[in-house]
Image (cartoon, helix red, strand yellow):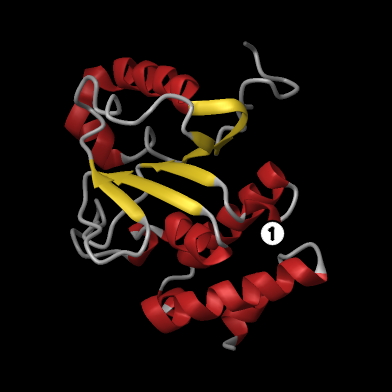
Amino acid sequence: MADVLADIVALGRTDSDRALLRRALGELDAQCQLALKITANHHLAVIMTEFITRLEDAFGSLAATRGQAVLDIACGSSSSRSPVTGLQASEFEPWMCRLLWELGAYPVGLDIGDNAGEAFEHHRVDLGVPGALDFLASGSFDAIHESRLFGSPEFRSAHGPATERIRREIHRQERRLLRRGGVLIHSDGRRGPGEPGHPG
């Protein structure tokens, strides 16, 4: 395994999680050239580290993600482009969904970009459209992941003054979609309903 992936495997907190991570990252390397993309873009290693740490914090272990239904809002896509260069950018690919799939979870990815050919369930959705998430059944997810959507220059450029309205709507939908005892996996550290520290 490439050294760059070995460093990420070391993030596993137990021997069994490191073995699981080694296998998952090996698959992502074989299918998506993960090591090559990390070598070309170090920021992707930072993103993978963040995702793995979030999953460990949310579920207690990577092994505990097996069989969990996880919604990834604004998951990224193989057609995503850098807002700066306009070129395809590996850090915007759907890495969380790919990782969850390889860990044995059931990810569902939502993005406005194209994810045709991905193994996980995915839907092309414009999150700025009112009711965009209404097609998903209430209480159907064990966890919901949302990361960097509202800080995205593309999102702010596309939706401008409507950004706060969209944020409120997505957070309302998250409460509807999350199963009792489920967890929100957010970069801002918000807790899910029923968890210590959750405001509601």
Instruction: Identify whether 48 is placed above or below 121.
Output: below
Q: Position of residue 169 (x, y in %)?
A: 35, 18
- The answer to whether any part of residue 188 appears in the image is yes
**Looking at the image, which residue sits at the far right?**
14
Task: Name the side, left or right, on which 103 lies relative to 61.
Answer: left
Task: Name the side, left or right, on which 177 lies relative to 185.
Answer: left
Residue at left offset 56%, top offset 54% = 51
Instruction: Identify whether 188 is placed above or below 37.
Output: above
Q: Position of residue 175 (x, y in %)?
A: 49, 20
Q: Nearer the viewer, residue 190 or 103?
A: 103
Residue at left offset 57%, top offset 63% = 103
- The answer to whether any part of residue 10 appears in the image is no
Q: Nearer the viewer, residue 66 or 17?
A: 66
Q: Position of residue 167 (x, y in %)?
A: 37, 22
Which residue position is annotated with label 1?
63
Q: How many marks?
A: 1
- Looking at numbered disc 1 in the image, what kind of residue is underneath it? Ala
Residue at left offset 29%, top offset 22% = 163
Residue at left offset 21%, top offset 51% = 113
Q: Position of residue 106 (x, y in %)?
A: 48, 52
Task: Name the side, left or right, on which 159 lies relative to 200.
Answer: left
Q: Nearer the viewer, residue 15 or 179?
A: 179
Task: Name the side, left or right, on which 23 lies relative to 110.
Answer: right
Q: Quadrant of the N terminus?
A: bottom right
**Circle 1 crowding by C-alpha within 10 Å: few under 14, some 14–19, many from 20:** many
Secondary structure found at label 1: helix
Q: Quadrant of the C terminus?
A: top right
Q: Nearer the viewer, residue 111 or 66?
A: 66
